[in-house]
Image (cartoon, rainbow, N blue to C red):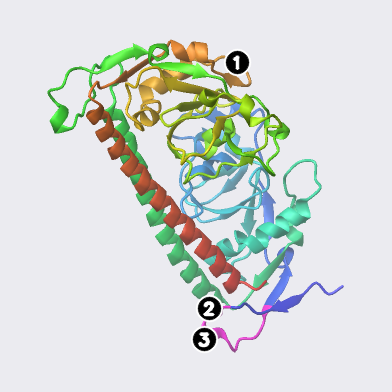
Amino acid sequence: MNKEKKLIPELRFPEFEKNGEWEVKEFSSFIKLYRGSSPRPIQEYLTQSITGVNWIKIGDTKNAVNSIINQVGEKITTKGAEKSRKVEKGELILANSMSYGKTYELGIDGCIYDGWFVLREYEKQYHKPFLLQLLNSEYMQQQYQRLAAGGIVQNISSEIVYKTMLFHISRQEQQKIASCLSSLDDVIETHNQKLDALKDHKNGLMQNLFPQDGEKVPKYRFPEFENDEEWSFEPFGKVYSFLITNSFSRDKLNYDKGGVRNIHYGDIHTKFSTLFDITKEDVPFINLNVPLDKIKPENYCQVGDMVFADASEDMYDIGKSIEIVNLKDEKLLSGLHTILARQIKTKLAVGFGGYLFKSSLIRRQIQREAQGAKVLGISGTRLSGISIFFPKNKKEQQKITICLSAMDDLIKAQTEKIKQLTTYKKGLMQGLFPS
């Protein structure tokens, strides 16, 4: 069987158009893999000493910038390092478990465990920045997924990696492609940094626009409200009452037809904005398999209602919430594992509650009230006792809401810009690498 193939990409720099087809061979023809190893039991070799050796794990990739790992969360002793695989700054490592197939460059020296392969003996064949782009391309990721399919454990062996097919071209063309893609990575990273700065600024505003422990007023008040009285502190249960929610599980609902929409608790965790506008959110229609006239009008969501997710495996997510700010005359139900709360008397301006229940002081109270072991839960009864706070002047509430929602708009726009750039890069890579 002939394992060599030749291809030409759709996009090619003019100076290389006459270079002919790209060569394609198995990974094993170009690169050698060396698996990491771990001293056991690892707990005996972990250290906080400044003389410790960087212990590079898959989890450290969360702080990688442009696929370069510059910091780690743990270190091991020099004795532990002797039982592990040492790697050096500038080397490439490939994940073989968890987020398998992703390749990173090391910005530090250290040791790797058996969740990594280190790539060596490729320098005569590849320009490193090109190889890093190639190995992280969709072309390579699809090969890993196809070859690993059917396995009980989601990981890839050296045999699987060695069977993947790699492109090979002249070093000059490699350098040109790498330079093009790396410059785009720099643009994306600049926008990521801007997004992080916007999020940090919003977090700072949240800390300063709402009171913290022991405070009766926030650190910052808009000038026109500086002489206003202290904020009101009241139990949740005196400001909000609870309503019946739709208790059907997702698999019992018919999404093909129906006259109402349904909020699922999982979407509160991952999908919906703080201020829920039905014209801007993707909420499915459902068929409850019961006559709609059996549902009391007051049990549909209304503008100003708060909807809380009452279950989560993560303490950080428990009790996350959204506020309904626009329904556009549509019927909306609060679904399984949610708590629907409505103001008894309108003390909070529309939108203010959405941000209030994301303030750190209230989030900590909700987390303290959560119960459960593997799956955490929060009930309306336990929510009723937490202390909420607000300025009596609704104009101040509205000013805070406008300020924070403007930040959310900037964050959303920046996130969309990064998404567009990432999509553009993906398309560019599909053109620069043969199919």
Q: Given the image, on which type of amino acid does mark 1 rest?
A: Gly
Q: Given the image, on which type of amino acid does mark 2 rest?
A: Gln
- Relative to residue 35, is residue 90 drawn left or right? left
Q: Which residue is label 2 attached to?
A: 172
User: Marks 3/1: CA distance?
Assistant: 65 Å
Observer-side mark, 3 or 1, equals 1
Residue 15: mark: 3
Is residue 21 inside the magenta stretch? Answer: yes
| Secondary structure of residue under mark 2 | helix
Q: Position of residue 214 (x, y in %)?
A: 27, 14
Q: Nearer the viewer, residue 109 or 368?
A: 368
| Secondary structure of residue under mark 3 | helix
Q: Nearer the viewer, residue 176 or 42?
A: 176
User: Marks 3/2: CA distance?
Assistant: 10 Å
Assess disc 3: are there few (<14), some (14-19) or many (≥20) residues with their C-alpha within 10 Å of its C-alpha: few
Q: Position of residue 343 (x, y in %)?
A: 40, 20
- Relative to residue 196, is residue 8 drawn left or right? right
Q: Position of residue 362 (x, y in %)?
A: 39, 21
Is the residue 61 above or below the residue 209 in the image? below
Q: How many marks?
A: 3
From which residue to which does the magenta span run? Answer: 11-22
Assess disc 1: are there few (<14), some (14-19) or many (≥20) residues with their C-alpha within 10 Å of its C-alpha: few
Q: Which residue is label 1 attached to?
A: 372
Is the residue 138 above or below the residue 113 in the image? below
First-in-chain label (3 vs 2): 3
First-in-chain label (1 vs 2): 2
Place residue 124 in its image quadrant: bottom right
Q: Nearer the viewer, residue 401 or 120?
A: 401
Place residue 432 in its image quadrant: bottom right
